[in-house]
Image (spheres, rainbow, N blue to C red):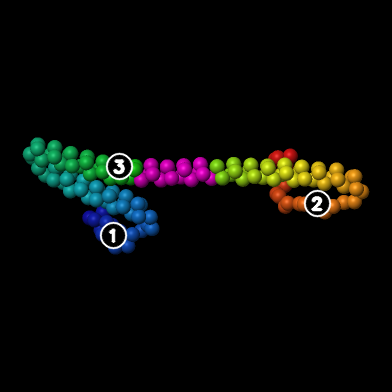
Amino acid sequence: MIVHGYFYIMRRSPPYKNTRLILAEKWCCIAYMVVLTLAFLRGSSDVDAIRKACAVFILISIAIAGIYILTNITLLYFAKFFTTVNQLKEKKKQKAIIIETLNLLEVHHRAIGSHVEKSNHRRKAISVDLPLRYIRIYM
């Protein structure tokens, strides 16, 4: 009776915001209620055909709830995997951009430095505020 009460309370005001999680809990509650009902029916019956049918329906209800949960977990992990791969690709692109920027700045400053030595006056240098960790890693 506790599961029945929880199931009806859950239907009125869902405890989660995620619809997949709500549906997974709903399937588990329904499977549990079916299992209890069929176990009670199986225990009170003396006919072998009814007992076997109840055992098969118990297995089917548990399998449906389990498959639903495992499918959602698998989809969640695939989504997380692809998100992580995209983040790593973006990080690699950013590193390449920083390396190219630092190399171009180095070439630019060398060109200005040789020009300054020839003309004996200093030109204003271009500077980019990069964190020190990038400068230490790539130089």
Give the left or right position of residue 107, taking residue 90 as reference: right
Residue carrying label 1? 11
Magenta segment: does it hold 84? yes
Q: Nearer the viewer, mark 2 or mark 1?
A: 2
Estimate the x, y position of residue 69 in percent, counting from the top left. 33, 45
Give the left or right position of residue 94, taking residue 65 as reference: right
Residue carrying label 3? 67
Estimate the x, y position of residue 10 in percent, counting from the top left. 30, 59
| Relative depth, front residue between 20 and 27 | 20
* Identity of the residue drawn at 77% across and 52% down: 126
Query: Number of numbered discs present?
Result: 3
Secondary structure under tag 1 reads helix
Mark 1 and mark 3: Cα distance apart in space: 22 Å
* Identity of the residue drawn at 51% across and 44% down: 86
Mark 2 and mark 1: Cα distance apart in space: 67 Å
Estimate the x, y position of residue 51 in percent, counting from the top left. 12, 39
Label 3: few (<14), some (14–19) or many (≥20) C-alpha neighbours in 10 Å? few
Amino acid type assigned to the residue bearing label 2 in the image: Ala
Secondary structure mainly formed by the magenta segment = helix
Q: Quadrant of the C terminus?
A: top right
Secondary structure under tag 2 reads loop
* Identity of the residue drawn at 26% across and 54% down: 3
Labels 2 and 3 touching (C-beta < 8 A): no
Q: Which residues are magenta?
A: 72-88
